Image (tube, grey):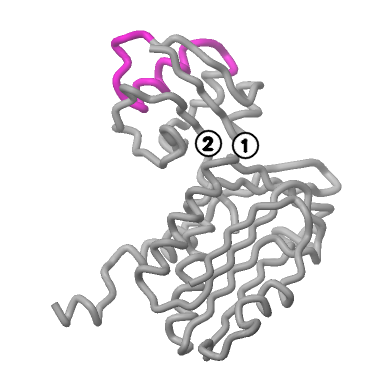
Amino acid sequence: MKATVRLQREPFDAAMVAADLTHGRSDVGALVTFTGVCRGDEDGAPIVALTLEHYPGMAESEIERHVAEAIERWPLLGVTVIHRYGRILPGENIVLVATASSHREAAFSAAEFLMDYLKTRAPFWKRVEKAGGKSWIEARTIDDAAAERWSAPPRGREAAE
Amino acid sequence: MTVKLRYFAWVRERIGKPEETIEIPPDIATVSQLMAWLASRGEEYAYAFKDAKVIRAAIDQRHVRADAAIEGAGEIAFFPPMTGG
């Protein structure tokens, strides 16, 4: 089981990172990759850039804890999470979650679980730069609701007990 | 009790510094009491902690609720709801 968590300022190549999870092995039957990309507009107005502030140390440990939880909940063969910080331009990658498993259900679910938690629990804050100035992006309650659904025990397991 | 405080995003901007080490009076027991005490330290703190309900906290880099005890904490951080991902 290969788990990698990386926080970095530099852009990354999502395809190369994902390919690493299947390289030289034949037991992976499903590889899910999610890439979050910096949009060129916010609330209908064009943006110049996003700047991501993070809490060094805590950001790594929060992501690592959730990766460990994903590994416990789903039969994964590999997980990679990369999150950038600093100034990011429209069209550039912000975050990558890649999960490998024998079958697709575990890979899809684990990737969604990790993204939902990154959005609401990983200590990162986005500031948007527009022509008129800079402002902090507000947290969305829809993201909290998405993360909340994972705190209930999986139905199948509950029924089996 | 001497504690290192760290501030992020708009909490940091309103207070005007990313971190400081301060002496906390012994009658301050919880995170929410600490926020109320900090808010009384000056205009910039009052502004930062005006909406204390929305501010999140971490003790020694783990998320905690407002009613968490601060005893034994080495580092306490205050920040807005997170917007990563």
User: Can you say which quadrant of the picture contains the C terminus of chain A?
Assistant: bottom left
In the image, residue A107 lies at what x, y percent?
Answer: 49, 80
Instruction: Establish if A1 lies above or below B70.
Output: below
In the image, residue A73 lies at what x, y percent?
Answer: 35, 71
Q: Is residue A30 visible?
A: yes
Residue ID at (30%, 32%): B68
* Between discs 2 and 1, the one toward the N terminus: 1
Residue ID at (31%, 25%): B30
Crowding at dot 2, Cα within 10 Å, few <14 / some 14-19 / many 20+, comes out as many
Compared across the picture, whether B37 is left or right of A43 comes to: left
Read off the residue under disc 2: B79
* Closer to the camera in the image, B68 or A79: A79
Amino acid found under the numbered disc labelled 2: Phe
Crowding at dot 1, Cα within 10 Å, few <14 / some 14-19 / many 20+, comes out as many
Residue ID at (80%, 52%): A49
Instruction: Establish if B15 lies above or below A99.
Output: above
Read off the residue under disc 1: B9
Q: Secondary structure at mark 1?
A: helix
Q: Is residue A39 visible?
A: no
Residues at circles 2 and 1 in contact by the CB criterion of under 8 Å: yes
In the image, residue A23 lies at what x, y percent?
Answer: 65, 82
Q: Chain of mark 2?
A: B
The magenta stretch spans which residues?
B25-44
Q: Chain of mark 1?
A: B
- Residue A88 in magenta? no
**Snapshot quadrant of residue B6:** top right
Compared across the picture, whether B57 is left or right of B65 comes to: right
**Snapshot quadrant of residue A53:** top right
Amino acid found under the numbered disc labelled 1: Ala
